[in-house]
Amino acid sequence: MKRLLGVILLGCLLMAGCQEKKNVILATVGGKPITQSDLDHRLAGIPAEIRAAATERKKEFIEDIVSEELLLQEAEKRGINRLADVKQLQEEARKKILIAKLIELEVDNGSLLGSADALSYYEAHKEEFKAPLLLRASHILVKTEEEAVSIKSQLDLGADFEELARAKSIDATGKRGGDLGFFQKGQLVPEFEEAVFEMKKGSIAGPVKTNFGYHIIKLTDRIEPSVRDYESIRKPLEEKLIMAKRRKSLKELVDRLKTKITVTFNEKAVV
């Protein structure tokens, strides 16, 4: 029993010591004390990396609080807090703070995900995470069909595609051997896509006419559609599901409030 009383007494002394520390006055401004509790509150509201620096330079940070308090007291002395535009801003801030807190309590706290929610969604909706078919192609673009036919004949006889692209193509890609990089359906002009999406890797086709001229096309790579790995999409998926739950909860909250609070519209004024 004595040991238990000793532990309780020690706990009370520690709590009293912590409270006393929080009430330590660090500075006074016009008679208003700035306490350790005020400093702790300020530190808690800033990013961790800045908080560490502020803790190391405690006096500088306190001086910043003092400067802010000096400006506040001067503003109040001049009656700036009673100006109409300031009152309006204060009222707008009050509304936003109250609404944000209500949403935090009624919406955000209920929009958290369970540990397996995102994975369950992924398993049931894998089609959503399917990477599209990707092609990589090179082309040689010329102005006339006759030029295109001639180039195709040279390629059929074994000419180097990249060299001909550099020498003959009027497109800027000619400088890099005609390489267009990877693309998916819908990113290129329809006539070009109609031809290239029917090709096999390594094959050469053309001439293909588009608004730009006549193309000779070589399909250099083809990556078949595949489902993205769960870990690669986990974070954006979790964010998407949280936002969906949040929108749903917010709508339900507003709908509930509409059943409790009468809302009317002036139909003539709102049309």
Image (spheres, grey):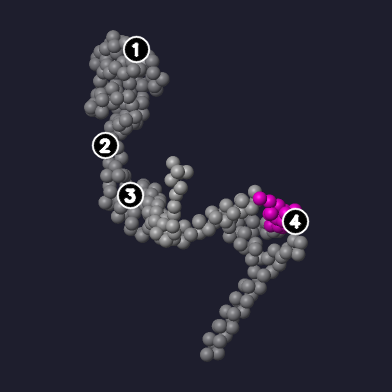
Q: Which badge, 3 or 4, is on the more N-terminal residue?
A: 4
Label 4 crowding class (10 Å Cα cut-off): few <14, some 14-19, many 20+? few
**For numbered disc 3, what is the local secondary structure?**
helix
Q: Is residue 267 above or below residue 157?
A: below
Q: Which residue is mark 2?
A: 224
Q: Residues within 10 Å of mark 3 (few under 14, many from 20)?
A: some
Label 3 vs label 4, nearer the camera: 4
Identify which residue, 211 or 233, lies in the foreground: 211
Is residue 95 among what the camera can see? yes
Q: Which residues are drawn in magenta?
A: 65-84
Measuring 40% from the left and 52% from the top, which residue is drawn there?
Answer: 247
Q: CA distance from mark 3 to mark 4?
A: 60 Å
Reading the image, the residue beneath label 3 is: 230
- Element at label 2: loop
Instruction: Determine whether, in the image, residue 83 is placed left or right of residue 184.
Output: right
7 in relation to 256, above or below: below
Q: x and y percent of residue 20 in the render?
A: 66, 73
Sequence-first disc among 2 and 3: 2
Say which residue label 4 marks: 77
Q: Secondary structure at mark 4?
A: helix
Residue at figure coordinates x 44%, y 54% from the top left: 263
Please, what is the three-letter code of the amino acid marked with disc 4?
A: Lys
Along the polypeptide, which appears first: circle 3 or circle 1?
1
Which amino acid type corresponds to the residue marked 2 in the rendered image? Glu
User: Which secondary structure lies at badge 1?
Assistant: loop
Check disc 1 and give the amino acid type.
Answer: Lys
Quarter of the image where the C terminus is located: top left
Quarter where residue 212 is shown: top left
Q: Nearer the viewer, residue 187 or 227?
A: 187
Instruction: Identify the disc placed on residue 143.
Output: 1
